[in-house]
Image (cartoon, rainbow, N blue to C red):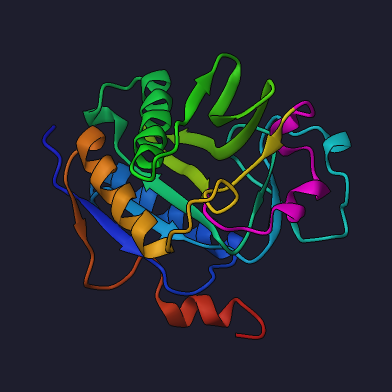
Amino acid sequence: MKLSPASWQISDTLVPYPAAVAAMDARAGAIADGTAGEAVWLVEHPPCYTAGTSANGADLVAPDRFPVFRTGRGGQYTYHGPGQRVAYAMLDLRARGRDVRAYVQNLEGWLIDTLAAFGVDGERREGRVGVWVRRGGGREDKIAAIGVRVKRWVTLHGISLNVEPDLSHFTGIVPCGIREHGVTSLVDLGRVVTMAEVDQALRRTFEARFGAAVLNDGPALMPRATIEADQPGL
């Protein structure tokens, strides 16, 4: 099965989490049906906590702080909010080897390559999905998370990279169920970069690992009017 370049889409306003999941599900279903091509969708969400399929209720420290959404991705609790780049990858594994483990490793590699573009050494850790940075004195902080679901051999969800989120928002959960390590961001590490610069690096490093991606200049995965209708106060 030959793949066309993935549609690379960027939303310029905060996307409510439930609306994003609904749009992603619809696109993934269309990919599985053969009526749409692969897509990568870059978004930011209003502050929220999401619970993966392995989430432990004891890890939700502040249940009333932000909205909490249960989701079908793997993993435990995580935080999404402004200043964090979330990239939803809807890719067809039928044409990519049907190897979920290799796919997750490629997502980790994609993040590590992106961090390297800003002089940050991201690392994998056995038994801990995501990307980590050494802080000295034996301390390690998580800078990027991965959560994946595969339905009919099409991927859903993807990665989140901390660019400049409010790191105090992570204190309402035990991120990914890991208590002995913290979280960090590019800005926290002294890399003051714009989201546009991060997006450019993400696209360049995605193409090196997954193949071509073409910036979508047509209808978005979710039109702005739909986002605004689902986001009170915008």
Q: Image height check: is 66 above or below 60? A: below
User: Most extreme residue toward the top, as rendered?
Assistant: 126
* Viewer-nearest residue: 174 or 19: 174
Residue 168 forms part of the magenta stretch: yes
The magenta span reads: 162-180
Q: Residue at x 62, y 58 (%)?
A: 165
* Occupied quadrant, residue 33: top left
User: Most extreme residue toward the bottom, as rendered?
Assistant: 233
Q: Residue at x 72, y 38 (%)?
A: 175
* Viewer-nearest residue: 94 or 172: 172
* Viewer-nearest residue: 191 or 211: 191
| Residue 224 in the image, given as x and y percentages of width and height | 43, 79
| Residue 178 in the image, given as x and y percentages of width and height | 74, 28
Position of the C terminus by quadrant: bottom right
| Residue 88 in the image, given as x and y percentages of width and height | 43, 49
* Viewer-nearest residue: 123 or 50: 123
How many tags in the picture?
Answer: 0
Q: Residue at x 21, y 42 (%)?
A: 207
Q: Image height check: is 147 above or below 14? A: above
Position of the N terminus by quadrant: top left
* Occupied quadrant, residue 230: bottom right
Residue 105 forms part of the magenta stretch: no
Q: Residue at x 83, y 37 (%)?
A: 59
Q: Image height check: is 216 above or below 191? A: below
User: Most extreme residue toward the left, as rendered?
Assistant: 2
| Residue 121 in the image, given as x and y percentages of width and height | 45, 31
